[in-house]
Image (spheres, grey):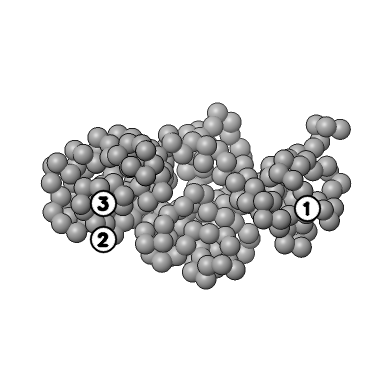
Amino acid sequence: MEAELKRINKYLSEVGYCSRREADKLIEAGRVTINGIIPEMGTKVAPNDVVHVDGKEISNTNQSFVYLAFNKPVGIVCTTDTSVEKDNIIDFIKYPKRIFPIGRLDKPSEGLILLTDDGDIVNKILRASNNHEKEYIVKVDKPISQTFVDRMAGGIPLEDLDRVTKKCVVEKLSTYEFKIILTQGLNRQIRRMCEYLNYEVETLKRVRIMNIKMDMPVGEYRELTNEEFSELNRLISDSTKEYKPNTVRRN
């Protein structure tokens, strides 16, 4: 029946292999097969079809999903392609199940990033990426002026993207440190905003994603609590899903 067919990217997401965005990259690279044949983008999968990625059969384990909050150290790259980047987040955490990061935090930055094997929630969070809050603590190379605070908060033109950043909350914390709360996620956004005003970022740390706060040491992770997960679902969708966290794990 047509109702039982699923697009290949949706299938890989729902079985917890990767996000739809990552699945599209795998399909485009020819690393996915359905019944031994490399599919086109948008090809649908039937219940009895056999799907492989890089020659390994993919199936739905029907196990409960994992939701982790991780304090990423500087120097670790948010990629699942362990063959390309040796300092990658997957090898660093060494979690016993296949997981993938939700969004990115660039290599020179540290702080909170979420990881999961639930492709559905990844898609919901990324779709809401221009609405949910992300909070950062930033240290720059020279004293912070009120003009700097006002201009950062009011929006900075990024000429190569032909756009102005959204208005945001900026608060001076000390001579060289400020807090910034963004509701958009452009590539290297804070660094580029500072560069426009002739400031250089020395350290950048993400301390909150929506309702989830970073409360663990650098390099360690924990599972989301029931309360965090419920509120996260409320923020990204009208629907909810049941979730029971396992015992807190530490790296």
Q: Distance of mark 3 from mark 2, alpha carbons?
A: 12 Å
Which residue is located at x 39 percent, y 41 percent?
161
Asked which secondary structure carries label 3, the reply is helix
Q: Nearer the viewer, residue 181 or 187?
A: 187
- Which numbered disc covers residue 195? 3
Expressed as whole percent of the image width and height from the top left, the position of residue 154 reads: 24, 35
Residue at 63 percent across and 60 percent down: it is 97
Q: Amino acid at mark 3?
A: Glu
Image vertical order of residue 37 relative to residue 150, above or below: below
Query: Relative to residue 132, is residue 116 depicted above or below?
Result: below
**What is the x, y in percent for residue 237?**
54, 32
Coordinates of residue 115 in the picture (x, y in percent): 53, 53
The kind of secondary structure element at disc 2 is strand
Q: CA distance from mark 2 to mark 1?
A: 46 Å
Disc 3 or 1, which lies upstream in sequence? 1
**Label 3 packing within 10 angstroms: few (<14), some (14-19), many (20+):** few
In the rendered view, does 56 fall on the left or right side of 241? Answer: right
The residue labelled by disc 1 is 38
Number of residues whose C-alpha sits closer than 10 Å to that of mark 1, classed few (under 14), some (14–19) or many (20 or more)? some
User: CB under 8 Å between callouts 3 and 1?
Assistant: no
